Image (cartoon, rainbow, N blue to C red):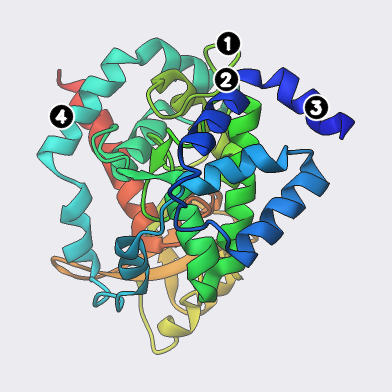
Amino acid sequence: MQVMRGWATRYAPWVGLVSILGTAQDALAGDYEGSPQVAEFVGEMTRDYGFAGEQLMGVFREAERKQSILDAISKPAERVKQWNEYRPMFITDARIARGVDFWRQHEAVLARAEQEYGVPAQVIVSIIGVETFFGRNTGNFRVVDALSTLGFDYPPRAEFFRKELREFLLLAREEQVDPLTLKGSYAGAMGLPQFMPSSFRAYAVDFDGDGHINIWNNPDDAIGSVASYFKRHGWVAGEPVVSRADVRGEQVDEGLTTGIEPTKTVGELRALGWSSHDALRDDMPVTAFRLEGDNGPEYWMGLTNFYAITRYNRSVMYAMAVHQLSEQLVQARGVK
């Protein structure tokens, strides 16, 4: 019990608020009151991480099971869009204009992030633009509701979301914030860069030095955290992202990458009829892919930094949207 008392003393404001909320709800149990799964989870958090069990149960008395979340995650996947349909969703005049404004507003912070992490300002801005339209669409679900609903009522991925719920409660304790106040997407992604709780704890940074990490409404921390994420996932400063390719012959499709990981080298692709527009080393591993553009098929080689972008979202089209939006931001900013 000594660990629990120590935690309660250190995080008294958090504990006090949760305790009050729990007491107020005693007469009206929440959706997870009496749940064996929740009781087991609380027991694990108490045993393994020193949480005070009663205070943690106060959180779950307030947590709500959201059918809309289960509906959203369970709905059949939409038809996979082609690149000429996907690209216009993100490369828009409005997003570019807002991105230029965001860049100008936070120019000094972006420059510092680029200097410290080696990630170009335009890539950081583009990620925040693609993810949340620069904070316009960060999600309206309480994170505790999203992760509880998916962790306890969505068996296909319950283990994953219970892990994220654990990480979320840990980050709320570390940041000394009430976990009932933080909002995100229906899947629990949070803030301007839409970090899952595990990514928050692993990569988010206190970039303005105020003693707290706030990616919800502190652009400085969001910018630094995106840069930190990419640096930790292999971004190489000064290196390109993709290279356009020409193709010829009957073996071209044999060069296409299955999945995301780069499995063939430039030299191996050249033997299959691929020719890069840029000078690339033969031993360089690349992700080779084809996109359906407005003017027909496009062939591309994704380089190390392209793979780093796919670590944010495992989609070739997502990575290309981020890259091409970043290029458009540079061009638009240059003429203003």
The residue wearing badge 3 is 5
The residue wearing badge 2 is 206
Q: Is residue 336 above or below residue 71?
A: above
> Marks 2 and 3, how far apart in space?
27 Å
- Location of the C terminus by quadrant is top left
Q: Secondary structure at mark 1?
A: loop
Q: Earlier in the sequence, mark 1 or mark 3?
A: 3
Q: Nearer the viewer, residue 109 or 6?
A: 6
Q: Nearer the viewer, residue 181 or 116?
A: 181
Check disc 4 and give the amino acid type.
Answer: Ala
Check disc 2 and give the amino acid type.
Answer: Asp
Q: Residues within 10 Å of mark 3 (few under 14, many from 20)?
A: some
> Marks 1 and 3, how far apart in space?
29 Å
Q: Earlier in the sequence, mark 3 or mark 4?
A: 3
- Location of the N terminus by quadrant is top right
Residue lying at the far front in this picture: please name it: 27
Check disc 3 and give the amino acid type.
Answer: Arg
> Marks 3 and 4, how far apart in space?
51 Å
Q: Earlier in the sequence, mark 1 or mark 4?
A: 4
Asked whether the viewer can see residue 235, the reply is no
Check disc 1 and give the amino acid type.
Answer: Gly
Q: Dots 2 and 3: beta carbons under 8 Å?
A: no
> Marks 1 and 4, how far apart in space?
29 Å
Q: Dots 2 and 1: beta carbons under 8 Å?
A: yes
What numbered label is drawn on residue 97? Answer: 4
Q: Residue at x 81, y 24 (%)?
A: 6
